Amino acid sequence: MRTATLINPAKMDTVRSHFLFYLPCLLFIVLATSCSTHSKPEVSLVSDALLTNEDEQMLWQKSEQEQLAFESNGLIYPDQELEDYLNQMVAKLRPQSAPQDLVIRVKVIKNAYLNAFAYPNGMIYIHTGLLARMDNEDQLAAVLAHELAHCTQRHALRAFRKYKDQPAVLIAVQHTLLKTRGLQDMARFLGITGAMAAISGYARELEAEADRLGIELMTAAGYNPREALFLFDHMITEIKQEGLEEPFFFGSHPKVQQRAENLQKLLDPVYSNIKPAIKNREIFFSKLAQLFLDNARLDIRLGRFQAARRGVEKFVWIKPDDTRAYFLLGEIYRQRGQASDTHKALKNYNRAITLDPNYAAPHKAIGLIHYKKGHRALAKKFFESCLQLLPDAPDKAYIQGYLKQCALSEEG
Amino acid sequence: MKKFFWIILFLFAAGCVACTHTGGLSKPASYSFTIDIPEGWRKIDNNRYLFVTKESPFLQYIMVQNRPIGRSFRNTKKKIQKEMLPEEAAQIIIDELISDQNLVNLRILDNTPATIKNYEGFKILYTYSDSEGQTYKTLYYGFIKEDTFFNLRFTAEGRIYFQRDIGVFRSILNSFQIIKADAA
């Protein structure tokens, strides 16, 4: 084993001291993840003023470091108007009882996976993937209110205090980290506190508390809590249909199922007479229109064609004459390649060209379809028109190769 | 600490097997290709790929793989198919790379057709950083032969080692030969 040569011996003391910090943190994640199946002590309420204790200060400090690290990696979805909209919603949902000096902020992460999570210092992150699955403002309020409750109830601190003195079970930590590949990635990516919030979620009782308070907050703000159920049901269906295996809290079938069951139990006795209220479908769609399209591109990359199609169709609902949307629909069908998809792809590419004859991408795509079918003369026509419209196309070398083959076919 | 953590994970992922110094013609039993490994480079192989490094995988590595088409990738659900054009296969590799959360600030510098030992394929050049800010550069060749997707890639630290060791990769690429799996 040559691993020793990869570590600077001078850094070993620092490594050891970091290890002493990380080990309880890792244990904390693992135990918090698995706690729903083990007997456990009560998670005590915190009544101290904010940041008066060292452990909370440490958690906040760690959170800020982790946020800085991963935000500087270009992962934030850059849409200030959307961010303002989300922050206004959180302000509307925020309870009077929340600590005055707890500043709640929301940012969007450019990621197609279904997730939202909150850091102990009030920073809430929500993925484009989860936003793109929503149909109205009530559903958005449900997720934001749940995350908000984690912050105002100081769940991270309560979980940390509960598990920090548990006996070290190093083997359990290693086992969990090594068997859960997504956890390895994300623990590194988000840092320790972020990984716990994003991946494992909190202990069952804390999640249940966030569910209950979340419903109270959204109802108090005038939203319809039943929409939360529609969102979770929709997500459960999608997770099953698409066979999603995501490492995240909201992308994990048992956890979303648990959210839905909790909500059902809470809603039935108390909220059965709530009338549909805010919804704000038009405002919601207009604020998220670009996100629907951008996230559809991410879904196409992941090969989640059904989700991508739904995203583009939401965009089209707001902007019915946008050529990019029809090109993307064409891409979805061409890449999916099921029976009759070629016809659907061509129809959408042609619509894109009708809307903007100078848009080169659909010309290339139509050329590819004909090329693969052996219709070289037709393919040539579209490849040529693509290069005429965009002489320095990034895929010029491929197109020139196809044109060369088309010319050889003509000669043959 | 993070590096230490990743070294452990890397060794685990690589299977910690057969970490021996080798040179000359390599014919790993489970591979349907051969390459010449230069003196001083070490081979780590398992039944999924052949992995070669000189100093450390954090500085440079060459990976060669004969991947059955239709095998799932880690991130994208798309699969490489027999009838795909090289450009379509390249797009799936790019989709996989872009969807990989470990590759920060990924930039595709080049994606062009390439011929590898008379097979029509593609070449992708890209850079990325890891979570510690270390920048890497990768040159990735791929092509489809019947039911196998072959790929050869060279990844190295971007400032010094990529330029220093790209020649070794080219010599390995030149030595690359496809052989029938049962002859391996």
Image (cartoon, coloured by chain):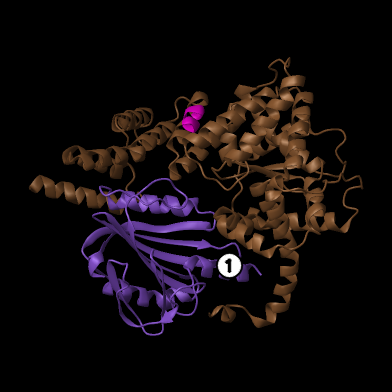
Residue B85 belongs to the span the image colors magenta: no
Q: Quadrant of residue A227?
A: top right
Which of the chains is purple? B
* Residue A36, placed above or below residue A191: above
* Residue A247, placed above or below residue A268: below
Chain bearing mark 1: B
How many callouts does the rendering have?
Answer: 1
Residue extending farthest to the bottom is B39
Residue A311 belongs to the span the image colors magenta: yes
**Image coords of residue B68 (percent x, y):** 32, 56
Q: Quadrant of residue A217?
A: top right
Q: Which residues are magenta?
A: A310-315
Disc 1 residue type (three-letter): Trp
- In the rendered picture, chain A carries what hue? brown
At x 60%, y 54%, the residue is A183
Residue A58 in sight in this render:
yes
At x 65%, y 40%, the residue is A80
The residue to which callout 1 is attached is B6
Front-most of A22 and A374?
A: A22
* Residue A54, placed above or below residue A272: below
**Image coords of residue A215 (percent x, y):** 74, 28
Front-most of A375 and B177?
A: B177
